[in-house]
Every structure is written in C-alpha cells, then in structure tokens.
Image: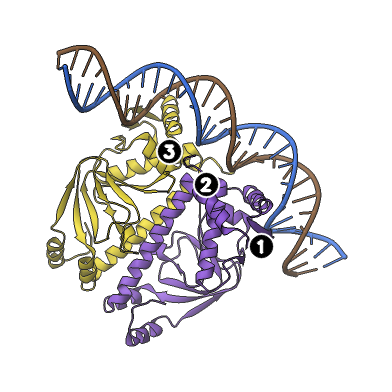
Chain colours: A purple, B yellow, C blue, D brown
Amino acid sequence: MPVGLSEEDLDQLDQLVFLRRSLRRGEHLFRLGDRFQSLYAVRSGFFKTHILMEDGREQVTGFQMAGELLGLDGISTERHSCDAVALENSEVCVMPFDRLEHLGRELEALQRHLHKVMSREIVREHGVMMLLGSMRAEERLAAFLLNLSHRLSARGYSAHEFILRMTREEIGSYLGLKLETVSRLLSRFQEEGLITVQQKNVRLQDSAGLRRIVGNEGGAP
Amino acid sequence: MPVGLSEEDLDQLDQLVFLRRSLRRGEHLFRLGDRFQSLYAVRSGFFKTHILMEDGREQVTGFQMAGELLGLDGISTERHSCDAVALENSEVCVMPFDRLEHLGRELEALQRHLHKVMSREIVREHGVMMLLGSMRAEERLAAFLLNLSHRLSARGYSAHEFILRMTREEIGSYLGLKLETVSRLLSRFQEEGLITVQQKNVRLQDSAGLRRIVGNEGGAP
DNA sequence: CGCCAACTTGATGGCTGTCAAGTCAGGTGG
DNA sequence: CCACCTGACTTGACAGCCATCAAGTTGGCG
C-alpha cells in the first residue's frame, strides 16, 4: 500500500499490520468518544463516517472504500470524534497508532506517507467545503457521482457502472441535501440521458455532461 | 507552542524556526500551485485560506489567527492546493517541512504534536461540514461568532468584544451564505439583543442566547 | 407471502439568493 | 482641511431553489 518502502521495510510493516477485523453490514468500527488506538485501512467493503448534533441531526463526513484510511480524527484528542459504520460486510487492517508512530521514526518513507495521507484528507475536505458552500444541488450530485466513479476506477472497477452502497438519505446528508432532492435529481439526470439509475445501480451514460454541470453553473454566460 | 518538549528539545526547535516573514494586508503567503516547502505558524495578524473554481466562485476554507498553522494542504502533493492571504499586516514563522520531519524522527513529542495538529485540522473541517451541510443560516453565523470568541479568548483577548478582520463577503463564503444574508443576520441578532455590531466591531451581549440558536433548531420538541 | 425500509413523485411553502438602491467610512488628492 | 471617491455595508422587494409534507410504489428479507 505505501509506496517508496524497501523489502525490509515492508517486512516490518507486515508485522505491524497483521491484525484484521471483519465487520457486518451496519456494525460500528468505532464510535464518538471511543478511545483512539488505531488507524484502520479498509481492505474490502464500504464505510461511512458521520457526526451527530445533540438535536439528532446527522452529517455524513465521508465514504471510505478499499485502500482508504479511517480513524485520523482520533489522533488529536485520543478519542474518536465521529462514528464509523460499515455499509456492507467489510474487512479492515487494524494499525495501532503508537506503533505506526514508532516505526515512522525509523522509516522515513512511512513517516512521509502518513503525513501525505493526512494532508490528502485535509485537501479532500476542502473540496467538500467547496461543494457544500458554493455549489447548487445538481452540481453537488454530479460531482459526487464523478468522484465515486473516479475512485472506483482507480481500484480497478468500472468507472461507468457501479452500485451505491449508501442510501439516498446518506448521500443527501453528505451533500447537504434532503433525500427527496437526491431522488429527484437522480431521476432528472436520467431523463436528461446523463445516467441510468435503478435503485442502487447507477450507470454513467455521459460523464462529460456531468462534468459540464459541475463547472458551468455560477459562471459567466 | 508545542507542549511536552524538554529544554534541550526547545533549543533545537528554536534553531529550526528562526526564519520569520512579514506580510502586509492583502499579501499572499502562498498561492495555489506554489511548491510546498514549509509550514507557517502565525505569530501575529490574521489570515484566510480559500480555493477558487474555474468559473470564479470562491470558497473560504478557514481563518487563521496567532498560534495557528498554515500550509498543511501542501504536504500531500508537494504543491499548495489553496491560497493563503493576510487580512491584516501579519508575521509568520517559516518552518521548512523536511526539517520538521527530520526532527520529528528524533523528537517523539514533536512528531506527536505534528500529528495532533493535523488531526485537529481534520476534526475542525468535520465541524465546518456539519455547519455547511446541516445548519440554517442563523445557526451558522451564531456558531461562527462563538467560535471566533472562543479562539480569541484562548489567546488572551476579550471573549465578548472583538473586531472582524474579514469582510461580510468572506464570512459569507466561509459559511456558504451571501454577504447580504450575513449582513441581515447581524442586524437581526442586534435587534434581538444578542450582539452589538457596528461595522467590523462586534460585541457579544448574550452568548448563551447564541448558543441556544446553534443547538435548538432542527431539533425535537 | 407479507412487512418494512427505501425510494419516487407531487403539491406547497419558506429560506435564502438575486437585483437594486442607497448609506457609511476611510483614504486620497487638491 | 475638506471634498470626493471607492469599497464595504445595509436594507428592501422579489423570485427561485430546495425543504417540507404527503401519498404512493418498490424491492428485499424474514
């Protein structure tokens, strides 16, 4: 997974990440307030992270698929500040963080990799802020579909046909929209020939059209 | 600044962060695409970071004051992914990142501190996502004012009276609102006796009232 | 087979954006 | 020192996007 490591380094890594954990659909990997001990690398499956307000409102902060990391939120206070839930049966690598830090002091490449991963998460969240703060509903959804497509194809899956592991409500929460709006927009995208959607199955028919939606809306005439 | 370091450690740190840089109001600390080399600790003054879409729309991603860090976005690709601008005459510590990493390999406390700072930024952004995705306009502004108040008082300034270093438009961009909405809400908060506002000067008259606004709006009866 | 959660679709309303006009404050130059 | 000028702000009127409320419909699972 991390690049730039020698054979010997990798041996040490293997030894580090031996522990695995399987989760059933709906199961929590960690909860708000749980003591932070490990980062988790998704090996298979699909997760969401979310936070809750006292009054019950929920904000999904991310969806994580194979190869992505969970738990970075916990480092700062040594307690997790959000919930992580498996959206399907999944498996993760459990990577005890004190051991990661310890090893990072010896392996420059590992240290650097960890820093880059954390920074990438910060940059990703900047993108979400742009999405939530400056885009209209249809732009948000188009950007979301394109992002899923991109990440799936980077993992060897089809870029044009995939399954939405999350509900309309979870998509809506992530995008700052209500589930009805998500549903309506998916229907409209289909009417316009941009996608085909049937329940959780989505097929991007015209990704260029979706990209046009994302860039072309607050803009100059 | 970092806690948990010995005297000797601090000597090494002093040696590391010797370089300072002054910026005039309006000046860029770095721009999108600039090669990443250093993190910056704000010593005095006030900054904003923001990203731009091709069509010109802007999203402010954060405001940084004394003691806060800038530049974490650049680690992942070794290029900055946003712009940082001084909102008043300011001074920063320039901390070359390769030296930070190098020293982090020797000083466990420094390494840990860096990790916590990055994690804290991730958690902060989760909060902003909640703000943008799930809160109504008046909740966002109330939360924003309370957050400023909190951070200023942590730095020894008054928690109840302060100056907004940014324009209404920048506040709006950060909160996903238009400047007119920000202006209207500030006026309304004043009518309701929650704050006093005169141009850039704000006085929180009833922080409890503001807190009530933040928590009590989508909620159950 | 039946139930229930997830989803779709329609009707309506309100929050916030948009457009517009005016006010205010601070800086600049005569 | 004052008048002007400009950017920042305020306030009003109106509109549109998306939320809300309300029925249905579908599909999966026990």
Vertical relation: B48 (above or below) B201: below
The residue carrying mark 2 is B134
Do the residues marked 2 and 1 share a common chain? no
Disc 2 versus disc 1: nearer the observer: 1
Whole-angstrom CA distance, mark 2 to mark 1, is 24 Å
Secondary structure at numbered mark 1: loop
The numbered dot on residue A191 is none
Mark 1: amino acid: Lys
Quick one: which residue is furthest to the front in this view? A221
The amino acid type of the residue labelled 3 equals Leu
The chain under label 2 reads B
* Contact between labelled residues 1 and 2, with CB atoms less than 8 Å apart: no
Q: What amino acid does circle 2 point to? A: Ser
Q: Inspect this view and state whether residue A8 appears.
A: yes
The residue pinned by badge 1 equals: A200
SS at circle 2: helix
Disc nearest the viewer among 1 and 3: 1
